[in-house]
Amino acid sequence: MSQKQIVEVVDDGGDTATLVNDNGFPLPNFPEGIGIDRVRSVKIRDDDILISTYPKSGTHWVFEIARELLAGKIIDDDVTKGQAFVEMVPEEKYADLPSPRFLNTHLLMKHLPDDVRNKKIKIIYVLRNPKDVAVSLYNFLRTIPFINYKGEWKNYLRPFFQGKFIYGSWMDYVLDWEQVKKDNPDLPVLTLFYEDIKEDQMREMRRICEFLGVERTDDFLSKVCDNTTIASMSTRKKPDDSGAKVFRKGGVGGWKNWFTVAQNEWWDRLYQERMADCPLQFKYTL
Ligand code: A3P
């Protein structure tokens, strides 16, 4: 039995965001959203490639880069990672895509079909520093009509940290993934950082090529770089049906324009407590 109900999440100023509580996990109320119970039964192919991220970590960017690298050609269409976003799109809409398919999700491993692990499909796991994620998600939430959030930044940050908004806590997500990697050392997972791609896209694309088992020339890689700038992608990708704005600034360190000194000190203190055992280091500026 599905356990889904609409909830109004209240921020520190009394503004609300309309979400779905799906088996205790806060999700967007996607118009066609299939819910965690049905995601669990999605059929996984041996050669599916899964892009797994916490929201706003560069999913669209990495999808575009990875599919062009795999195809070995520049692709100029308007397709986005949304075509096989497993918790948003009914399975029949991507079931006939030719192999290998790029699936993507922001769910936790426990929400995904067991065959993701049983079949040991390739997973590209992308992380981004949580301060830029917090800002990006704030701006994103305010553009999604069916979430209908109008709150102010100062009232958003604490509930964000606590995991009240979509997909729960960033810290829980990252800690869960570190545990999944530890418990499943034979799972093929490529861990990428948004900031590293910004810093040296050629280097990170070589890592993606190696992971996907393809060889591409530097000349081709540099064409992929040109075709995957935020300016290039934002002109050719059609906006999401929801009206959500995906392409915003696309930088590293934008959080400094949003976090007050007090918010930053508060964040750093709580972050250190919560993430004390996590070995991951993030770049907050380049
Ligand atoms: P900002 O809101 O900080 O600008 P996702 O795809 O996971 O939803 O992540 C969205 C974030 O990635 C947004 O960050 C967006 O602007 C940024 N982004 C999208 N395309 C990008 C690109 N080609 N290069 C760099 N950043 C990109």
Image (cartoon, rainbow, N blue to C red):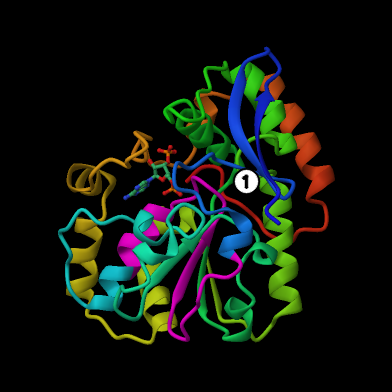
- The range drawn in magenta is 40-66
Q: Quadrant of residue 90?
A: bottom left
Q: Residue at x 36, y 66 (%)?
A: 94
Q: Is residue 262 one of those drawn in magenta?
A: no
Query: Ligand 1 closer than 8 Å to the CB at disc 1?
Result: no
**On screen, 15 above or below 182?**
above
Q: Residue 152, percent across and down?
A: 57, 16
Which element is circle 1 on?
loop
Q: Quadrant of ligand 1?
A: top left
Residue at left offset 68%, top offset 13%: 14
- Residue 200 in sight in this render: no
Residue denoted by label 1: 167
Amino acid type at circle 1 is Tyr
- Give the answer, above or below, for where 181 lies relative to 38: below
Please tell me whether residue 230 is drawn above or below residue 72 in the rendered image. Answer: above
Q: Quadrant of residue 144?
A: top left
